[in-house]
């Protein structure tokens, strides 16, 4: 397993690429990405984890903010390059960027979504997943099983 976080450059390789989309909420959400990484530690996969180690919640939402611009562009590129996008929606958050990412990639066939019914917009998530034939589960272990199956069933292509 290899983990790439922003602002590190996304280098092409032939392993399956998994993007960890989901609740971060400026650091308020649990570090579920670390749980996923631990579970997949013995798997041949490249994980794109947007939870930046040097994140500064005081960064302004100004489009000219270089750190924020680099973060956003890194995430957009990683989402496009990913073979699988695993979305985790924490019911204790609002997760507006996660909702944006779900909408942007709903048509790609790359999504596996974990969202408990307690999420404040669960019906929107549910019907979007039904409409786009996206896998949706309310159970973390089932979600992880689907991620592992995706890694082993979808061939990664050599990007060179």
Image (cartoon, helix red, strand yellow):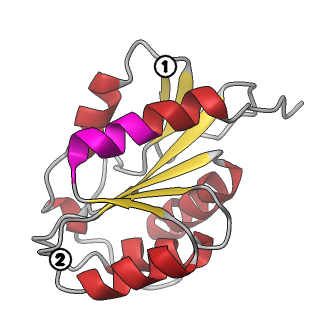
Looking at the image, residue 95 sits to the left or right of residue 119; the answer is right
Q: Residue at x 11, y 75 (%)?
A: 118
Disc 1 or 2, which lies upstream in sequence?
A: 1
Between circles 1 and 2, the one closer to the viewer is 2
Q: Residue at x 14, y 70 (%)?
A: 91
- Does residue 119 lie above or below 13 as drawn? below
Query: To which quarter of the image does residue 45 belong?
Result: top right
Which residue bears the numbered disc 1? 1
Label 2, secondary structure: give it.
loop
Magenta residues, dominant SS class: helix
C-alpha gap between disc 1 and disc 2 = 31 Å
Task: Indicate the position of residue 138 as horizontal and vertical percent values.
Answer: 23, 59
- Does residue 23 lie above or below 84 as drawn? below
- Does residue 15 lie above or below 134 as drawn? above
Q: Nearer the viewer, residue 141 or 19?
A: 141
Query: To which quarter of the image does residue 60 belong?
Result: bottom left
Looking at the image, residue 17 sits to the left or right of residue 99; the answer is right
Which residue bears the numbered disc 2? 119
Q: Which residues are magenta?
A: 139-146
Task: Indicate the position of residue 108 as horizontal and vertical percent values.
Answer: 68, 65
Queried whether the magenta region covers residue 121, the answer comes back as no
Q: Can the viewer see residue 116?
A: yes
Q: Nearer the viewer, residue 22 or 134?
A: 134
Task: Indicate the position of residue 9 as horizontal and vertical percent values.
Answer: 63, 40
Q: Can the viewer see residue 65?
A: no
For mark 2, does the 10 Å Cα neighbourhood hold few (<14), some (14 to 19), or many (20 or more) residues?
A: some
């Amino acid at each position: 397993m290899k983990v790439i976080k922003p602002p590190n450059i996304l280098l092409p390789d032939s392993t399956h690429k998994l993007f960890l989309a989901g609740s971060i909420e400026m650091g308020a959400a649990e570090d579920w990405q670390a749980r996923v990484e631990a579970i997949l530690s013995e798997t041949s996969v490249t994980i794109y984890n947007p939870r930046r180690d040097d994140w500064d919640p005081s960064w302004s939402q100004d489009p000219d903010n270089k750190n924020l611009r680099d973060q956003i562009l890194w995430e957009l590129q990683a989402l496009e390059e990913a073979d699988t996008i695993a979305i985790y929606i924490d019911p204790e958050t609002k997760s507006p960027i996660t909702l944006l990412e779900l909408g942007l990639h709903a048509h790609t066939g790359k999504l596996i979504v974990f969202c408990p019914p307690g999420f404040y917009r669960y019906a929107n998530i549910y019907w979007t997943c039904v409409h786009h034939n996206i896998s949706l589960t309310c159970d973390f272990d089932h979600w992880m099983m689907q991620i592992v199956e995706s890694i082993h069933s979808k061939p990664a292509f050599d990007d060179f």
